[in-house]
Amino acid sequence: MNEILKEGRIIKEGFTSVYFLVKGEKLLTSLEIHTNAGGDPEVFRVWEESQKDKEYFCNE
């Protein structure tokens, strides 16, 4: 698990294809993080819209 949550690592979530950055053992994302990792901006926007009613959503 330590390798997965290695500080600064970029992780692509398999189901949504959204990219996350590991920071302080948390997964953070933003349009900038996602697109800088090679992600499609529209995929991020659709994912972000789907997260608006969920308590755990955290955007940097």
Image (cartoon, rainbow, N blue to C red):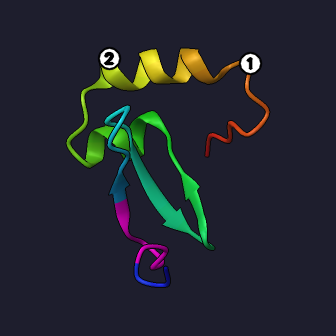
Q: Is residue 37 left or right of residue 57?
A: left
Give, as a single range, the part of the protein colored magenta: 4-10
In this view, 18 is above or below 52:
below
Query: Residue 29: horizontal and vertical position, in percent?
Result: 50, 45
Q: Amino acid at mark 1?
A: Asp
Residue at 36 percent across and 57 percent down: it is 11
Q: Is residue 8 left or right of residue 52?
A: left
Residue at 56 percent across and 17 percent down: it is 50
Q: Nearer the viewer, residue 44 or 12?
A: 12
Residue at 37 percent across and 38 percent down: it is 18
Q: Is residue 30 left or right of residue 12?
A: right
Dot 1 falls on a residue whose secondary structure is loop
Residue at 49 percent across and 65 percent down: it is 22
Which residue is labeled 2 in the image? 42
Name the N-terminal-most of marks 2 and 1: 2
Specify the principal SS of the magenta part: loop
In this view, 27 is above or below 42:
below
Which residue is labeled 1 in the image? 53
Disc number lying in front (2 or 1)? 1
**Numbered badge on residue 10:** none
Dot 2 falls on a residue whose secondary structure is helix
Q: Quadrant of residue 24?
A: bottom right
Q: Quadrant of residue 58?
A: top right
